[in-house]
Image: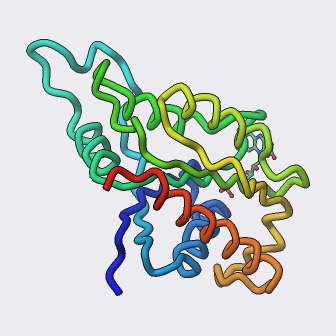
Amino acid sequence: MSASYRIAVLVGSLRKGSYNRKAAMAMKTLAPPELALEIVEIGDLPLYSEDLEGEGKTAPEAWTRFREAVRGSDGVLFFTPEYNRSVPGGLKNAIDVGSRPYGKSAWSGKPGGVVSVSPSAIGGFGANHALRQSMVFLDVPMMQQPEAYVGGAAKLFPDSGELESDDTKKFFTGIITAYAAWVAKFAKK
Ligand code: FNR
C-alpha cells in the first residue's frame, strides 16, 4: 500500500548523535503504512531577518526549499530537545522561516504533533509546550493526546540506534498510530 499522507518531520537537534533524530528514525519504522515520514532538514536555514526578503529581493534558497517542503506535506511532526526549558534556537528559527512572508505561512492547517526527547527525567516537557504555544498561534491543530515526553533518552537509544525496549516500542507505536488518526481527521484532502 502506498502512503496516503506525507509527513514533514522536523528534528530540533543539529548534533550527529541526536537522541531526537534517533527517535524520529525509530518512529518512521513503526509508522502505519498510510504515513510516509520524511525528515526536512533545518540546519542550513539562515537566521530569519525581514531584511532578506520582500520587495525586489529573492529570499534565501534554503528558506524557499524549506517552505516548499512544509507546504507540500499533509502534516508536521516535531522531535525536539529541550534547551533551557524551551525549544532550541534552530528549531524556533525554522518555525519563524515557515511562518513568513506575512499571510503566506506554510504551517496553516497542517495537523501537527510533538515528541520531546531528553536524557532528563521530565522528558523535555518545557520544550514540548513552548512549541505548542507557537504552533497553536500558527493555526496548526496539535494532537493533544497521547502526549509524548520521552525521558531517560541515553538508556533508550543505544549506539546502534535500534529501540531495544518493547515498552518503548509500544509507546512509540501508540503515539504514531494516534497521530495517523489525527492526520486523517485534519489533513486537507
Ligand atoms: C540542554 N539540555 C537540557 N535538557 C533538559 O532536559 N532541559 C533543559 O532545559 C536543557 N537545556 C539545555 C541547554 C543546552 C544549550 C544544551 C546544549 C543542552 C540537555 C539536552 O537535553 C541534551 O543535550 C540532549 O541530548 C539534546 O537532545 P539531542 O541532541 O540528543 O537530540
- Viewer-nearest residue: 116 or 22: 116
84 relative position to 46: left or right: right
- Viewer-nearest residue: 126 or 173: 173
Q: Position of residue 127 (x, y in %)?
A: 71, 39
Colouring style: rainbow
Q: Is residue 159 above or below residue 143?
A: below
**Extreme residue toward the left, this view:** 56
Q: Position of residue 12 (x, y in %)?
A: 57, 48
Q: Position of residue 180 (x, y in %)?
A: 53, 66
Residue shown at 70% from the left, 71% from the top? 174
Residue shown at 43% from the left, 61% from the top? 39
Query: How many marks can you see?
Result: 0
Q: Position of residue 135 (x, y in %)?
A: 54, 34
For the N terminus, which image quadrant?
bottom left
- Viewer-nearest residue: 120 or 115: 115
Q: Quadrant of residue 35?
A: bottom left
**Extreme residue toward the right, this view:** 121
For the C terminus, which image quadrant?
bottom left
Residue shown at 57% from the left, 66% from the top? 24
- Viewer-nearest residue: 109 or 25: 109
